[in-house]
């Protein structure tokens, strides 16, 4: 997962992480992905930037696979740019983890996603996956209701950028 650059140590944010349920029906291994929780403060309120998945169109956060020579948080920031056109200040502390089954080539691959907060400073109009996804700023409460994964819902619901 790349070299150890300065502050790339993973740490768990305050609060309890509930157990993650994985649907392992056979001996396939669990894949790891890195995701960004893009947010901004508008009129004193936290807003979350959600995007649609390419396959089903459900609301998700930007996420992707580990990248050679990149920290986990750096990979999350790259995905935020590629999938949502979001650029900003990234924290290297893990907010938490969530699990989901990724549909791939007719199979379901069990994945665990480590999530990093990204304070969005700039949202560009042109980005690599702009024709494949929609993006939307929503309130923290609304975002927690729009995503499917229970652990991600809870993570968004209790997210505090000051901690």
Image (tube, rainbow, N blue to C red):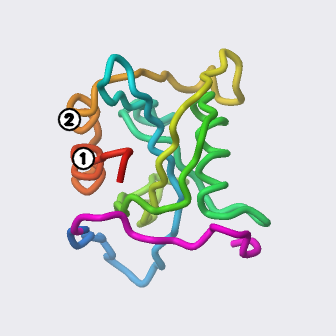
Residue beneath label 2, please?
A: 145
Percent across and percent down for residue 125 are: 66, 15
Percent across and percent down for residue 135 are: 48, 23
Q: Is residue 95 left or right of residue 69?
A: left
Instruction: Please name whichever residue, 163 or 120, is drawn nearer the observer in this view of the structure.
Output: 163
Residue 121 picture quarter:
top right
Percent across and percent down for residue 29 are: 48, 79
What is the tally of numbered marks visible in this picture? Answer: 2
**Residue at (55, 59) in percent of width and height:** 92
Q: Which residues are drawn in magenta? A: 1-16
Residue 89 picture quarter:
top right
Q: Is residue 155 magenta-colored?
A: no
9 to 153, vertically: above or below: below
Helix, strand or loop status at disc 2: helix
Q: Is residue 124 left or right of residue 53?
A: right
Residue beneath label 1, please?
A: 153
* Cα–Cα gap, marks 2 and 1: 7 Å
Helix, strand or loop status at disc 1: helix
Q: Quadrant of the N terminus?
A: bottom right
């Amino acid at each position: 997962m790349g070299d150890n650059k300065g502050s790339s140590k993973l740490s768990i944010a305050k609060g309890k992480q509930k157990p993650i349920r994985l649907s392992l029906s056979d001996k396939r291994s669990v894949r790891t992905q890195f995701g960004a929780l893009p947010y901004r403060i508008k009129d004193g309120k936290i807003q979350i930037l959600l995007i649609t998945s390419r396959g089903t169109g459900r609301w998700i956060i930007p996420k992707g696979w580990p990248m050679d020579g990149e920290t986990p948080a750096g990979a999350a920031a790259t995905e935020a740019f590629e999938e949502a056109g979001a650029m900003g200040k990234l924290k290297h502390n893990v907010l938490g983890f969530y699990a989901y089954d990724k549909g791939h080539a007719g199979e379901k691959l069990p994945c665990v996603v480590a999530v990093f907060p990204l304070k969005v400073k700039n949202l560009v109009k042109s980005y690599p996956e702009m024709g494949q996804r929609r993006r939307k700023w929503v309130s923290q409460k609304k975002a927690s209701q729009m995503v499917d994964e229970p652990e991600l819902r809870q993570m968004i619901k209790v997210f505090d950028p000051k901690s």
